[in-house]
């Protein structure tokens, strides 16, 4: 095994690809949580996105439709969560857990007929440059459009939350829904929108897995990534840029420890497998330890049910 | 520009309570109106109706003789009715400017110019780009007021605005309000503080149990006449005997106590020294957020310090937790009745049992002796005239005053040697305040001591034997109460010095 520059480039490219679903799902959930809604259904919405994307791809043979369809299906399933928590005022935590369980079961049911069908090749951009530019080629080029979008998303999210009026309103609702309502802001509408957006992003994250990363349908193929995305949001203290860092660390150590296992280092496999989780949390805790900033970024009303006085 | 606001036959009924019963009032610009009443008299419901937060069951609101519909806060804004709530409607984690821009349709540059004009005109000093959570209560209130001023209000409603302010901030607020009134804004001022009505307002409407009981010019009123209208009965004024404690036994001594917090939003305490004698009441004044919370927690044992720094009846108790301190006959009444002193979801008798885990009467072999606890609770309810005899009632259904009586009763029924209270009459009405004050004076007369941490200077001057001021975590010199005036306290509370 040679550690030439090109190999490192390929390795970094692989790390980036593996962190895409985390970035997408966590960025979506971050917006949802910033409005004060705690949706623990990320895993469920992701896997529904994964199966619907794959199924649509098989049925229509159109990747564009498949991607749009996966986002729509994530959005639709998040409507259930919205209805329950915002209109019927159920508990966020319990409803989110139920959504995950529902999503996993539902996807397994739909997916029965799609097991073993090979996926379709997803178009990758700038393939020529990838092979011709040493080191930077595999890092910057030869990825799917979704990966580029994913790496742009945290910056867009950051800008959206900090600089736009709608972003300001979302933060205000997450800070104090009662005050927002007294200012004439429609809290329920804002929270619904954020839930739906989060659902669509989780759907897209799922589609990335089943259409691009491992193009096939396997039951339970999200494998806990939804939970990691949730944890990332919290440990990144609701900052989009830190979510990106966290996702890259997680993806990076996941890939590296696989290589370490392959090399046959004398470290127990279990410890190596646990490494990404441990390291991600440690790094995020270290970079987010400014309690002043945490207080400013934390949505104060997270998980609280809001209803309007009549 | 003349503004006339009229409410006509407004009624609002909540389950089990008539909040507003055919309320009719008229207001005109150029004057400041007081809406006076005890807690639960229906003032807040009326202003919530005027600001569109709550819809009335019946009745109409007229602005300049036109009937207006107030179905949402937006409607109130459209009709140029501005409202500053008692509990601020600010977004703590957003910056001041963000708080202002969120409900403005102007672009950021224009808004900044406008806000700076307002700041200059009324001589407000606020940094627009720091998060609201770093502001003092008085500054937060100014942000609320600016938010209203941006919209050129015809009517400005202030709901109990001084409950969180210092004397100095209150004076500033009154100057501003008078200026607004001169600028043609109609001001409705809701309060249960009688002094403020007399010093600020031109007309006063008194509400009791949802009804308007009197409308009059403040020139024709006195504190006593207003108090009696508000409560509906004659209140006896209470006075404390000034005692001499030179020869009394020392019961509590704090020496060189320091506290350093890891939380940047807590206040560090620096080198505190104080002593307390048997039968004495020590008042601790100060603007909230100057270390009162931390001092209370250190006294109660929620924060544990070096053992030697606190001596109670000659025992070092700094390392003891609240339960152990109670065994040494200390008792505590925290500031926040709902979240610190009582568990609102629990029944009255369960809350009574909470601070008596060690009592063998209450618990036998790990089981709860419900009958004994209930008997004991009944005794508290009747001894401390709590307005119910149903010990099965959940505590959250008690009004603030009754809950406070229950808490003080629960603490006092074990006959402690020292009671530490933190803002015991915060947000209570005149009747309940009077009762709590009488009780606190009584325990001193029985030879028990008390420490009263309070942000209400009148209360401190009325009840304390000696007073000191806490400012930025430091205690001032401890003074005899008869040498202290409200002005002196005000200076010390603002960080000044006197000699």
Image: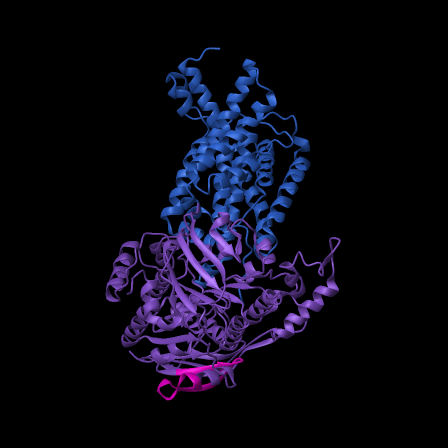
Vertical placement of residue B375 versus B292, above or below: below
Magenta stretch: includes residue B315? no
Q: As drawn, which residue projects farthest toward the top?
A: A1
Between residue B226 and residue A102, name the one nearer to us. B226
Image quadrant where residue B199 sits: bottom left
Residue A195 position in % (x across, y down): 52, 48
Magenta stretch: includes residue B212? yes
Q: Is residue B257 left or right of residue B394?
A: left
User: Quick one: which chain is blue?
Assistant: A
Between residue A276 and residue B335, name the one nearer to us. B335
Q: As drawn, which residue projects farthest toward the bottom?
A: B220
Q: As drawn, which residue projects farthest toward the front?
A: B247
Q: How is the image coloured?
A: by chain
Residue B63 visible in the picture:
no
Q: Is residue B497 left or right of residue A98?
A: left
Residue B489 visible in the picture:
yes
Residue A60 position in % (x across, y down): 57, 34
Residue A122 position in % (x across, y down): 50, 27
Residue A258 position in % (x across, y down): 55, 20
Identify the image quadrant of the C terminus of chain B. bottom left
**Which residues make up the magenta segment?**
B204-225
Image quadrant where residue B160 sits: bottom left
Between residue B428 and residue B139, name the one nearer to us. B428
Check the rendered structure and report the hue given to chain B. Answer: purple
Between residue A198 and residue A291, name the one nearer to us. A291
């Amino acid at each position: 095994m040679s550690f030439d520059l090109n190999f490192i480039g390929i390795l970094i490219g692989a790390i980036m690809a593996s962190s895409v679903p985390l970035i997408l799902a966590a960025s979506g959930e971050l917006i949802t949580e910033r409005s004060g809604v705690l949706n623990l259904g990320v895993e469920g919405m992701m896997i529904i996105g994964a199966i619907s994307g794959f199924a649509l791809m098989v049925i229509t043979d159109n990747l564009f439709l498949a991607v749009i369809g996966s986002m729509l299906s994530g959005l639709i399933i998040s409507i259930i969560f919205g209805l329950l928590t915002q209109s019927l005022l159920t508990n966020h935590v319990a409803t989110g857990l139920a959504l995950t369980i529902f999503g996993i079961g539902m996807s397994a049911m739909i997916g029965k007929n799609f097991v073993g069908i090979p996926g379709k090749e997803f178009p990758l951009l700038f393939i020529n440059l990838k092979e011709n530019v040493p080191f930077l080629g595999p890092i910057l080029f030869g990825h799917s459009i979704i990966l580029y979008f994913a790496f742009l998303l945290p910056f867009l999210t950051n800008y959206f939350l900090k600089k736009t009026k709608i972003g300001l309103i979302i933060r205000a609702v997450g800070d104090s829904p009662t005050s927002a309502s007294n200012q004439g802001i429609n809290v329920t509408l804002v929270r619904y929108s954020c839930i739906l957006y989060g659902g669509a992003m989780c759907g897209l994250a799922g589609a990335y897995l089943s259409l691009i990363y491992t193009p096939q349908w396997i039951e339970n193929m999200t494998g806990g990534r939804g939970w990691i995305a949730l944890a990332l949001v919290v440990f990144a203290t609701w900052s989009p840029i830190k979510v990106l860092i966290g996702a890259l660390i997680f993806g990076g150590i996941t890939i590296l420890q696989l290589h370490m296992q392959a090399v046959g280092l004398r470290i127990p496999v279990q410890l190596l497998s646990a490494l990404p989780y441990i390291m991600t949390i440690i790094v995020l805790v270290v970079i987010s330890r400014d309690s002043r900033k945490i207080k400013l970024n934390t949505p104060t009303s997270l998980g609280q049910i809001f209803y309007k006085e009549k | 520009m003349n503004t006339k606001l009229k409410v006509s036959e407004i009624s609002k009924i909540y389950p089990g309570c008539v909040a507003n019963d055919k309320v009719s009032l008229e207001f005109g610009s150029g004057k400041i109106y007081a809406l006076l009443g005890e807690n639960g008299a229906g003032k807040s419901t009326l202003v919530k109706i005027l600001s569109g937060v709550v819809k009335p069951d019946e009745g109409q609101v007229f602005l300049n003789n036109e009937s207006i519909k107030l179905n949402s806060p937006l409607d109130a804004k459209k009709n140029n009715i501005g409202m500053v709530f008692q509990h601020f409607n600010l977004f703590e984690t957003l910056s001041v400017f963000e708080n202002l821009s969120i409900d403005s349709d102007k672009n950021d540059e224009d808004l900044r110019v406008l806000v700076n004009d307002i700041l200059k005109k009324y001589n407000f000093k606020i940094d627009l780009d720091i998060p609201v959570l770093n502001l003092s209560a008085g500054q937060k209130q100014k942000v609320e007021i600016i938010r209203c001023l941006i919209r050129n209000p015809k009517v400005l409603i202030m709901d109990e605005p001084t409950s969180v302010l210092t004397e100095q901030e209150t004076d500033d607020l009154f100057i501003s309000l008078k200026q607004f009134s001169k600028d043609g804004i109609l001001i409705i001022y809701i309060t249960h503080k009688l002094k403020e009505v007399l010093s600020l307002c031109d007309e006063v409407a008194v509400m009791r149990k949802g009804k308007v009981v009197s409308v009059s010019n403040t020139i024709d009123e006195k504190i006593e006449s207003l108090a009696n209208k508000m409560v509906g009965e004659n209140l006896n004024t209470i006075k404390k005997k000034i005692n001499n404690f030179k020869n009394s036994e020392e019961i509590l001594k704090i020496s060189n106590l320091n506290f350093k917090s890891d939380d940047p939003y807590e206040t560090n305490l620096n080198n505190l020294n104080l002593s307390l004698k048997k039968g004495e009441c020590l008042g601790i004044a100060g603007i909230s957020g100057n270390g009162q919370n931390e001092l209370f927690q250190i006294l109660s044992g929620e924060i544990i310090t070096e053992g030697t720094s606190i001596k109670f009846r000659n025992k070092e108790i700094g390392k003891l937790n609240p339960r152990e301190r109670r065994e040494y006959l200390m008792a505590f009444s925290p500031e926040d009745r709902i979240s610190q002193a009582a568990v609102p979801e629990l029944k009255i008798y369960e809350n009574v049992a909470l601070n008596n885990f060690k009592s063998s009467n209450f618990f036998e072999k790990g089981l709860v002796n419900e009958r004994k606890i209930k008997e004991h609770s009944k005794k508290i309810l009747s001894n401390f005239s709590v307005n119910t005899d149903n010990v099965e009632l959940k505590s959250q259904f008690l009004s603030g005053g009754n809950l406070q009586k229950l808490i003080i009763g629960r603490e006092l029924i074990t006959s402690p040697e020292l009671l530490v209270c933190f803002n015991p009459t915060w947000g209570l009405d005149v009747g309940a305040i009077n009762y709590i004050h009488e009780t606190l004076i009584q325990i001193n007369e029985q030879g028990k001591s008390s420490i009263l941490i309070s942000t209400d200077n009148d209360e401190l001057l009325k009840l304390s034997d000696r007073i000191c001021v806490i400012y930025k975590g430091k205690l001032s010199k401890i003074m005899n109460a008869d040498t202290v005036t409200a002005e002196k306290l005000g200076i010390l509370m603002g960080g000044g010095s006197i000699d």
